[in-house]
């Protein structure tokens, strides 16, 4: 096996490594190697995005969920969550506030809540897109049929985030109850792409039972799917889940993976996630400095924020949207970057 620096140089040129090489890179890199890789990733992201950081206003529309994912704090079996769903008026108020703060992408995320029928979703999508025609709309609402995704798209939604969570079948089964399957997840991602969405996949770093081999499979899957967006963040335990006592994911490995993904897909939209900001006080800054180019501050009404708790100690659950925006703006400026009021679409190379 060549040394780590050589592997990083190969990754930069070929934009891919094979599975054994990825595992070697993941297992044998030093802090110095990670800094070398991060610098390459930063240069690539500067080339595509300059010092601009795109912002997405996250609106957590519902914490009702029919699924029971072992890692997730809003899983159906958690009886200690105060469940809520936002009305159309609530959602539109979030958008209005967000627009004034300079957001030009809104993300509606939620549990798989059957209250939000196709008709209801189509109505709210159309309403947002007609009030804010210059904004992009992203959905992150889980697994739906091709027909449903198509309705969302035809109503005007632009992007869809659906993390694949893990590309390994066995590992997938350890994170999810038997009703859920990796095959269906992958089909959803294929459908979303085929329909024309800017599509995002992704996974948790350090989820229970994850091995470096699994991560290598995730990277190969991401390359194959060739998504417009990739969302990764550290796994963080939630006290009311079966994984309450599991170790959290590694901060350093998350940063390292952000850099790898930037080298693999130079123009990908890559957020420094809230989970990254939760695991380390400088997480989002260091995410940007490792090759990320997107942040997703919360626009949800403060009254419901604490109830959308996917993992313990989630940051910014007490802040107003404006505070979040200003806080992030300051953080980005300190490291030489600027939050911009642009849609920030994926631009094919
Ligand atoms: N129901 C939607 C939205 C899920 S929440 C869907 O299925 O896509 C968005 C992401 O949060 C999930 O895809 C998962 O990767 C992440 N997440 C959930 N629980 C988490 C935890 N305990 N730690 C870190 N990330 C978590």
Image (cartoon, helix red, strand yellow):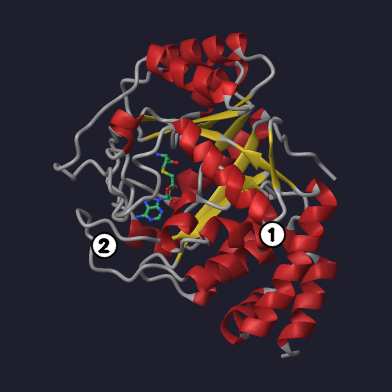
Identify the residue position indicated by label 2 in the image.
Answer: 243
Residue density around tag 1, few if under 14, some if 14–19, many if 20 or more, within 10 Å: many
Residue 287 in percent (x, y) is at 60, 59
Of helix, strand and loop, which one carries label 2?
A: loop
The reply to whether residue 271 is visible in this rendering is no
Residue at x 26% of width, y 44% of height:
75
Q: In this view, does 10 lie above or below 204?
A: below
Q: In this view, does 100 lie above or below 188?
A: above
Residue at x 44% of width, y 36% of height:
143
Foreground residue among 321 and 309: 321
Q: Is mark 2 within 8 Å of ligand 1?
A: yes
Q: Is mark 1 within 8 Å of ligand 1?
A: no
- Residue 126 falls in which quadrant of the image? top right
Of helix, strand and loop, which one carries label 1?
A: loop
Residue 20 in percent (x, y) is at 64, 80
Residue 163 in percent (x, y) is at 50, 48
Q: In this view, does 217 lie above or below 123?
A: below
Q: Which mark is residue 204?
A: none
Residue at x 26% of width, y 27% of height:
84
Residue at x 28% of width, y 43% of height:
74
The reply to whether residue 44 is visible in this rendering is yes
């Amino acid at each position: 096996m060549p040394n780590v620096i050589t592997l990083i140089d190969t990754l930069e040129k070929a934009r891919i490594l094979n599975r054994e090489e990825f595992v070697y890179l993941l297992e044998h890199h030093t802090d110095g190697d990670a800094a070398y890789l991060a610098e390459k990733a930063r240069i690539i992201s500067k080339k595509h995005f300059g010092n601009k950081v795109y912002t997405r206003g996250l609106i957590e529309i519902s914490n009702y969920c029919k699924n029971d994912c072992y890692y997730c704090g809003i899983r159906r079996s958690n009886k200690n969550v105060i469940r809520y769903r936002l009305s159309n008026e609530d959602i539109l108020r979030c958008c209005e506030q967000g627009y004034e703060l300079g957001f030009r992408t809104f993300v509606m995320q939620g549990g798989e809540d059957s209250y939000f029928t196709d008709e209801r979703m189509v109505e709210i999508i159309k309403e947002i897109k007609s009030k804010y025609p210059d904004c992009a709309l992203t959905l992150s609402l889980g697994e739906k049929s091709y027909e449903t995704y198509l309705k969302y798209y035809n109503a005007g939604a632009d992007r869809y985030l659906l993390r694949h969570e893990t590309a390994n079948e066995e590992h997938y089964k350890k994170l999810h109850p038997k009703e859920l399957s990796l095959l269906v997840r992958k089909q959803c991602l294929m459908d979303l792409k085929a329909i024309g969405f800017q599509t995002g996949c992704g996974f948790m770093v350090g989820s229970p039972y994850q091995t470096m081999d699994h991560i290598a499979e995730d990277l190969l899957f991401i390359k194959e799917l060739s998504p417009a967006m990739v969302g990764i963040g550290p796994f963080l335990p939630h006290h009311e889940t079966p994984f309450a006592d599991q170790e959290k994911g590694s901060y350093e490995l998350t940063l390292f993976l952000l850099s790898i993904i930037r080298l693999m897909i130079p123009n990908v939209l890559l957020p420094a996630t809230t989970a990254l900001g939760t695991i380390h006080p400088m997480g989002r800054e260091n995410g940007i400095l490792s090759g990320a180019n997107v942040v997703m501050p919360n626009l949800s009404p403060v009254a419901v924020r604490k109830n959308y708790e996917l993992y313990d100690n989630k940051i910014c659950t007490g802040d107003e949207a404006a505070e979040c925006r200003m806080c992030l703006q300051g953080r980005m400026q300190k490291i030489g970057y600027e939050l911009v009021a642009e849609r920030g679409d994926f631009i094919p190379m």
